[in-house]
Image (tube, helix red, strand yellow):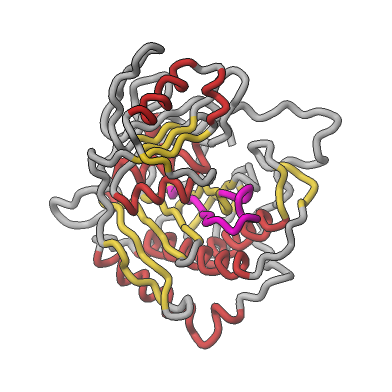
Amino acid sequence: EHAPWRYNGIKRTSYHSKRPAPQPPHILTTTMSTVPQSTSQDPPHHGINDGSGEACGSHSYALVDEEGKVVSRDESLTEILISKGVKEANFISAIVSLGEATAHIAVILQNYVDHSYAGTQNSSGDDQLHLDIDCDNAVFRAIREAGVFSIAASEETPEEVDVSPKTTKEDGPLYSLGFDPLDGSSIIDANFSVGSIFGIWPGKGLLGRTGREQVASVVSLYGPRTTLIIALPSKSRDGDGQSDITFEVTLVKDRSHWEVSRPEVILKPAKKVFAPGNLRATNDNAKYDALVKHWISDRYTLRYSGGMVPDVYHMFAKSGGVFSNVSSEKAKAKLRLLYEVAAMGLLVECAGGVTTHEFEDKSVLDFAVDDL
C-alpha cells in the first residue's frame, strides 16, 4: 500500500504555515511512497526471496534451540498470553511462532559481519542485504513450523505466499501475516537497535483487509535486550470487560525464556519528545516545516535514530512522544500499510494513542490494503 499516512497520538489537529496549532505529545506521522517504476538499470528481481523459510547457511540456530530451550520459550510465552486473556490455541501458537522467529533473528544479528548486498530490491525500492533475506527466511521458517498460518507476505517477499500446513489442526482457525522482517537495515551497520514488525489477520488473505481487522500485532526490538511488544485488541481477549492492551516481554536466561518486562504500555498526553522522519520533505512541504519548527520552538526533546521500530519503541518505553514521517513532492516516504503502518498503528491505539492519515481525518487502521 503506497499512500500518505499520519498518526496522531490524541486527536487530529490542523495547522497553517504561519503558526501551527499545538500538537498532542504522542503522534505518529507516516507517509507511504509509490514503488519506483522498473527501468533497465533496476536489479533483475524485486523481492528475491520466495518464502520457503530456508535456513541460513552462515548461522546455526543450535545454540539457541539446544537442550529443549525452544520448549521453554514456547511455554513461557504461552503462559504469558493465557494470563492476558488469550485462550484460542492456534492464536497462541501464531504469536509464539513470532517469538521463535525473533529469537532466531537475534542470533543472526549477533553474528552478522557480512555487509554485502543481494543485488536486488525489496518492494519499497531499497537495495536488499543478504541479511534482509536471512531474517525473512527465519520468519517464514518459524511460521511454517507453527502450522497455524495460511498466507504470509513480507517487504522482502511481496506476494501472498501459501504457508498453509499440510494437515490442518483439528477445529483450529488459520491466520494471515504481513511483516517486515528487518526494519532498520540502513542503520544496522552503525550497530543501532533495529526491529521486526508483524501484523496478524484472521482467516486467509491480506489484500482488501484493514488494520482494524487485525487480531494482534507484534514488534520485536533487537538491542542490548531482545524484546517483544504485543498489542491485543479487546476482541482477542476472552472474558467479560476486557480492554485493548499493549505489553512487553523480554527474552532472558540465555534466550531460553520470555518474561514480562512491562505488564502494560500506556501512552500519556504530556510527553514532549519528537522523532521527525523524512526531514527533507520540510524543504517543499510548508505545513511539515511549520510543524517541525513548532516542536523545536516548544522545546520538544529530539529522539531520532532513523529506524521506525527503535524510534516508536522509545515512545512506548517513555509513555509518549511524537513520530512523524511526512512526504512532499520531492521527498517521498517509504512506509507501507501492510508491512509497517497497520501493525504499528494497532500498537499505538491499543496503548491509548490515536493514529491519523496525513490528509484524511481518520485512523490508519480504517484503510484497506490494496497493494502488496
Residue located at (50% from left, 56% from top): 149
Residue located at (36% from left, 47% from top): 315
The front one of 269 and 302 is: 302
- Decide if residue 95 is on the left or right side of residue 65: left
Q: Position of residue 215 (x, y in %)?
A: 36, 48
- Decide if residue 35 is on the left or right side of residue 97: right
The count of marks equals: 0
Asked whether the viewer can see residue 169, the reply is: no
Residue projecting furthest to the right? 40
The front one of 323 and 6 is: 323
Segment colored magenta = 184-200
Quadrant of the rendering where the N terminus is positioned = top right
Against 307, residue 226 (above or below) is below
Against 162, residue 43 (above or below) is above
- Decide if residue 111 is on the left or right side of residue 211: right
Q: Position of residue 362 (x, y in %)?
A: 34, 25
Residue projecting furthest to the left? 241
Against 155, residue 150 (above or below) is below
The front one of 208 and 324 is: 324
Q: Position of residue 27 (x, y in %)?
A: 35, 35
Residue 233 covered by magenta stretch: no
Quadrant of the rendering where the C terminus is positioned = top right
Residue located at (47% from left, 58% from top): 221
